[in-house]
Amino acid sequence: MIPTTLVGSFPLDYNRENIKRALIDQYEVGITFPVIPQLRDFVYMYVEPLVNKGVLSHEHLGYEVRGDILSVEPEPPEDIVYAVDIAEDLGIKYRLAFTGPFTIASRLTPKGGKLGDIKSSLLAHEDLFGELLDYLVEMAREVSKVSHPHVVCVDEPVLSVIVGAKSIMFGMEPNKVTQVLDRLLGQFKSPLRGVHVCSRLPPLLKNILLPLRNANFLDHEHSDIPENRKYYSREELNSASKALGYGIISSRNTRVEEEQDVIALAKEALDTYGAQLAFLKPDCGFGGMRGFLKGKEYEEIVLRKLKVLVNVAKGLGEQE
């Protein structure tokens, strides 16, 4: 069986009961590497100590920096600590999603800046970005002390926004972005470490992700974005010692896929990448489905999609 995993979010209210439920359900459905569930904003959960100390002001469109980021000691998110305890008690090999510094920086704005405008964000302020990076590296170090994930993935959706065909916004150089990601990934010692970037992948992104020293897999959307399906060649991944997390289940479309359609996509992935496939998965998290079925999205859509994912992975394994 080709391993299976998830990206992170679920359309469930944030409470301990639902955290446990989302974790246990993945395990019981047969997901190889269940993800530690994200039931709240994936930026807030890592900057919460800064908000609590008044260093960040949480506004509708983002966060305004009002103090010294480095004056605050990072504390692992309580939901991660709670879910990790459950996973490790059950002997689950789990995946941990850590929101990346570029994505978090894109939501933070210096005092007086225009909230919600990426051009005014910390990405445009090298000194403040450096302070945020130092804070997040220390946060990663603290999280690594209380968790032992088999898979760690740094989530950087904003990279598909700021990286283009030939250049990166804010005058960033590809090797500098690589160095930032490597520094964060280096705080974890998991067997599988990687980076998730969603949406359509820009050409220059390869120059950032393939050279990563502290990552051995890359994770993207393929079900909803056919253009990504042959973004890398098998040879590129092999020569860079990278495997691929391949999305075969839509995390946007609320229709539950027919198994035969997913089998066809999984076979295409296997034919294209062969041994370079790390795992099969949904494209992204399912949090965006919240409210579609008035609170029944999790049972009626998400769990059914996960069963399709596991059945397809098992079926392919039996054919090998």
Image: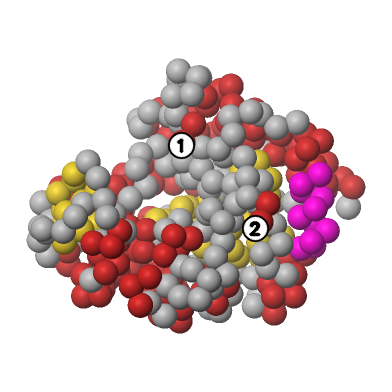
Could you classify mark 1 by the number of other residues whose Cα lies within 10 Å: few (under 14), some (14-19), or many (20 or more)? many
Place of residue 291 in the rendered image (x, y in percent of width and height, measured from the top left): 44, 24
**What kind of element bears circle 2?**
helix
**Residue furthest toward the right?**
319
Side (left or right) of 72 relative to 254: left
Which stretch did the figure color magenta? Answer: 264-274
Place of residue 311 in the rendered image (x, y in percent of width and height, measured from the top left): 76, 36
Q: Is residue 63 magenta?
A: no
User: Is 125 drawn above or below residue 80 in the view shown?
Assistant: below
Tell me what residue is drawn at x 17 percent, y 67 percent. Answer: 70
The answer to whether any part of residue 266 appears in the image is yes
Side (left or right) of 137 relative to 125: right
The answer to whether any part of residue 278 appears in the image is no
Side (left or right) of 46 relative to 25: left
Tell me what residue is drawn at x 29 percent, y 67 percent. Answer: 123
How much space separates mark 1 and mark 2, taking CA atoms?
22 Å
**What kind of element bears circle 1?**
helix
Tell me what residue is drawn at x 69 percent, y 75 percent. Answer: 236
User: Which amino acid is tagged 2?
Assistant: Asn
Residue 31 in which image quadrant: top right
Side (left or right) of 128 relative to 154: left
Place of residue 229 in the rendered image (x, y in percent of width and height, measured from the top left): 69, 57
User: Is 284 drawn above or below residue 203 in the view shown?
Assistant: above
Q: Which residue is mark 1?
A: 287
Place of residue 42 in the rendered image (x, y in percent of width and height, measured from the top left): 37, 47
User: Which amino acid is tagged 1?
Assistant: Gly
> Quick one: 149 or 109, which is closer to the camera?
109
Residue 228, label in figure: 2
Q: How was this image coloured?
A: secondary structure
